[in-house]
Amino acid sequence: MARPEGVKPPSPAPAALTSVAANPAAPNPERRATTESTQATPGGVLATPPPANSVPTPRLPLINNDGRLTLQVATTERSWVAIDADGKMIAQGVMEPNTVKTYKADAAFDVLTGNAQGVILTLNGQTMKPLGREGEVKKVHLTWDSLKQNTSH
């Protein structure tokens, strides 16, 4: 099948597609054209593919070398969140969609959210099970044992 004029053939390097999906805020026009050229529709019109993953990607290493718990809180929807580390309130407020924040604790975190569906928790690089439904108020206690008990991934 002939390509429309001016459209480059797909790149053989899948890493190029991954990097575009990982950073949709700063697309490379040349790579974007390559991605779109693989999404031809009947009639030869190019369709823009949906983002590979619109959920914020956890950025933590799988192993935490400092001996502390590291909690990453990422939001997919506007969510009110309160974070308690080792019995001390360290953060509280509304997090906008696609926000990622990281916190440290020695023994435990308590997380309270007013929109369980809109919050993704990652503890020491391990994404925790989904918290709940949209608008659901949820409190979660996370410790070293949470890493052993989590079965979502």
Image: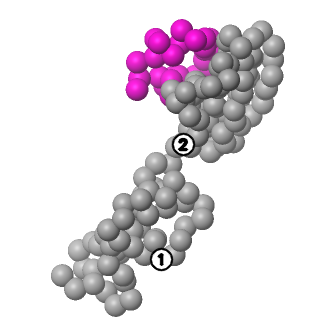
Which stretch did the figure color magenta?
127-153
Q: Which of 139 and 104 is in front in this view?
A: 104
Between marks 1 and 2, how big is the CA–CA gap? 24 Å
Indicate which disc residue 145 carries.
Answer: none
**Residue type marked 1:** Glu
How did the renderer colour the structure?
Answer: one colour
Residue 92 locus on image (x, y percent): 78, 26
Which comes before the other along the chain, label 1 or label 2?
1
Residue 104 figure quarter: top right
**Circle 1 residue:** 30
Residue 111 locus on image (x, y percent): 67, 19
Identify the secondary structure beneath mark 1.
helix
Residue 49 figure quarter: bottom left
Q: Residue at x 68, y 23 (%)?
A: 66
Q: Which residue is drawn at 23% across and 74% down?
A: 42
**Circle 2 residue:** 57
Q: Can residue 119 be seen in this view?
A: yes
Check whether the beta carbons of the residues at disc 1 and disc 2 lie within 8 A of each other: no
**Residue type marked 2:** Thr
The residue at the far bottom in this view is: 5
